[in-house]
Image (tube, rainbow, N blue to C red):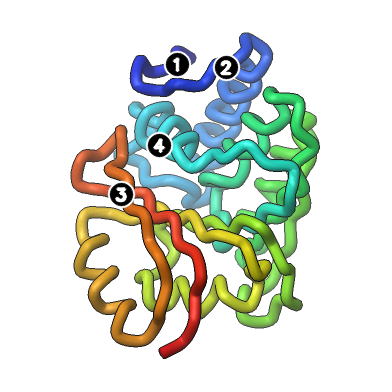
Amino acid sequence: MRVPEWYSRDVSRETLEKLDGYAALLRKWTSKINLISKASVDDLENRHIWDSAQVYIETTESWLDLGSGGGLPGVVVAILAQGDGHDLPMTMVESDQRKSTFLRACTRELDVPFTVIAERIEKLTPQSASVVSARALANLDTLLGLAKPHLSTEGQCVFMKGAAWADELVEAERNWRFSCEATPSRTNPEAAILRIKGIERV
């Protein structure tokens, strides 16, 4: 696996090997369960792994990934953090039992530490996480409602949103107050990474 020219962080050979291993697991398991779309398998590294790498933040504080599915971005973030020598407390929430089994296989086979909670987000006890992430889970208005109970006072959300992100932002502002920094995605010019803080219900 090659590091894209636009990716500004140093990535060690060992980290690239783990990302390769993760890509192999995704390909293997996707043939059995729906982790990623079959149409995106050939471009998995760009469409999924480096796409997810955009949200990585260097931190040793708690990170909660909601609706983790096939581990995007959670597993990618955990691998990058390990490669940087950070002891990142990563928790992934995935209610689908087959997908949560896949995530546990990832932590075991890749030797990357993270916790998997196999239950619905709405039933989760408050996590007080410093970072809450999600990719392709729900619209922004719904995401804010799911994330707020689990966010620490000074924490931030990092959401990966598609082409309709600006419309979702307008809709969410009807029900929530928050600060938002939108960064264009490097893998899809129509998409954006939203970094959100100070969430309060209107």
Residue drawn at x 35%, y 70% as measured from the top left: 139
Badge 3 or badge 4: first in the primary sequence: 4
Q: Which residue is mark 3?
A: 192
Query: What's the CA distance linking mark 1 and mark 4?
Result: 12 Å
Residue drawn at x 40%, y 31% as measured from the top left: 44
Q: Which residue is mark 4?
A: 51
Which of the 4 image quarters holds residue 87?
top right
Query: What's the CA distance linking mark 3 and mark 4?
Result: 10 Å
Give the crowd class for mark 3: few <14, some 14-19, many >=20 residues within 10 Å.
Answer: many
Query: What's the CA distance linking mark 2 and mark 3?
Result: 23 Å
Out of 175 and 52, give the one closest to the viewer.
Answer: 175
Residue 56 percent across, percent down from the top left: 54, 39
The kind of residue tagged 3 is Ala
In the picture, the quarter occupied by the C terminus is bottom left
Badge 1 or badge 3: first in the primary sequence: 1
Q: Which residue is mark 1?
A: 3
Residue 50 percent across, percent down from the top left: 43, 30
Element type at mark 4: helix
Element type at mark 2: loop
Query: What's the CA distance linking mark 4 and mark 2?
Result: 15 Å
Q: Which residue is mark 2?
A: 11
Mark 1 and mark 4 in contact? Answer it, CB < 8 Å.
no
Mark 3 and mark 4 in contact? Answer it, CB < 8 Å.
no
Q: Is residue 169 above or below residue 79?
A: below
Query: What's the CA distance linking mark 1 and mark 3?
Result: 20 Å
Residue at the farthest top position = 13
Give the crowd class for mark 2: few <14, some 14-19, many >=20 residues within 10 Å.
Answer: some
Q: Is residue 179 above or below residue 146?
A: above
Give the crowd class for mark 4: few <14, some 14-19, many >=20 residues within 10 Å.
Answer: many
